[in-house]
Amino acid sequence: LEVTTFYPYLSGRDNLAAIAILRGRGAQGRIDALLERLGLAQRARSKFRTYSLGMRQRLGVASTLLADPAVVILDEPANGLDPAGQREIRELIRELAQEDRAVLLASHLLHEVELVCDRVIVMKKGTVVTGGTIAEVTHRDSYFRIDVPDATRAAGLIRAVPGVREVRVLEGALDVVAEMDRGAELNRALSAAGIYASAIVPTASTLEDVFLELTEEERSAPAAS
C-alpha cells in the first residue's frame, strides 16, 4: 500500500471504478460499501490528489478488497495514519480475519503487529530467522534488570553463565537477555562470587525487543565505503 498508485486527477470513487474493471464480476457493486467501510464515503467524489496520506492508505485497502479475496496482502497499511486511523485499520484487519480470510501483513509498526496478528515471522536479508505465535516468538528469551553494587564486575560473571545472550551495563544495574528461566542461575553466579543483587526483576519482552536483538548485528555493522 505504501507505493499504491492511483490517478491523481480522478476521484477516489472513480479510481476504484477503474480498478474494478480489472477485478472482474461483482467488484463494481462493492465500491460504495468499501468507501463507507474505510471512512471515505464523504470524500468519495474528491480528486485523489487532494487526499491526505492516511486517506490514500485507506483507498489502497479498499482497492485490495474490491475482488473480495480469500487472501489479503497488506504492506504498511497503517503508515501515515494517526492513532485513531491505526485503530480503525486494526479493527478492519480483525474483521477480515473473522470473515475467514487470511491476512498477510507486512509492517514496521511492531506494536501494531502484536495487537492484531496471530502468528508472525521475522526476516533478515530474505531469510526467516524466527516465527510462530506472538507468545512463542516473544518468550524465546527472558529479560532481567539486575540491581548490583558493582555492575562492571557483575557483568563479567553474568556473561559466563550458559544461556546468556546479552548484557548491558548501566549505573548500578545490568540489563540481561538470557534463555527462559535463567533467573536463579544468574543469582547463583553472582552470590558465588560474593556479589549480592538487591533485585532481579524479570521484564516481559516485546516483539520489538526480539526484532532488535535478531537484527542488531546488521544494524551495528559499519557502512561499506
Image (cartoon, helix red, strand yellow):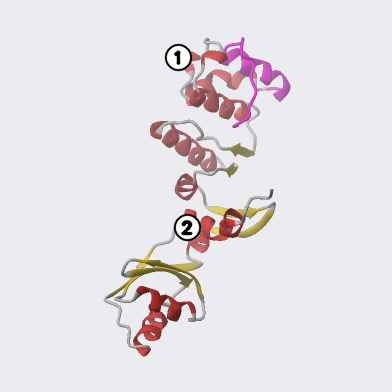
- Asked which quadrant contains residue 199, the reply is bottom left
Q: In the image, which is nearer the foreground, mark 1 or mark 2?
A: 2
Q: Earlier in the sequence, mark 1 or mark 2?
A: 1
Q: What stretch is highlighted in magenta?
A: 1-25
Tally of numbered discs: 2
Q: Where is residue 95 in the image (x, y as percent from the top left)?
A: 49, 38
Under circle 2, the secondary element is: helix
The image shows residue 88, relative to residue 178, as above or below, that is: above
Tell me, yes or no, whether the two marked residues, 1 and 2, touch with CB atoms within 8 Å: no
Residue 5 on the magenta segment: yes
Q: Position of residue 20 (x, y in %)?
A: 67, 20
Under circle 1, the secondary element is: helix
- Neighbor class of circle 2 (other Cα within 10 Å; few <14, some 14-19, many 20+) is some
125 vs 27, nearest the viewer: 125
Check the image and name the residue furthest to the front. 225
Q: Which residue does the numbered mark 2 point to in the structure image?
A: 209
Left or right, 26 with reference to 204: right
Check the image and name the residue furthest to the left. 198
User: If the image is split into quadrants, where does the N terminus sit?
Assistant: top right
Q: Position of residue 56 (x, y in %)?
A: 54, 23
Residue 215 on the magenta segment: no
Check the image and name the residue furthest to the bottom. 192
133 vs 130, nearest the viewer: 130
Query: Which residue type carries mark 1?
Result: Gln
Q: Which residue does the numbered mark 1 point to in the structure image?
A: 42
Q: Where is residue 191 in the image (x, y as percent from the top left)?
A: 34, 86
154 vs 8, nearest the viewer: 154
Q: Which residue is drawn at 69% across and 52% down?
A: 126
The image shows residue 163, relative to residue 137, as above or below, that is: below
Q: Residue 63 carries which label?
A: none
Spatial separation of the CA atoms under disc 1 and disc 2: 40 Å
Query: Which residue type carries mark 2?
Result: Asp
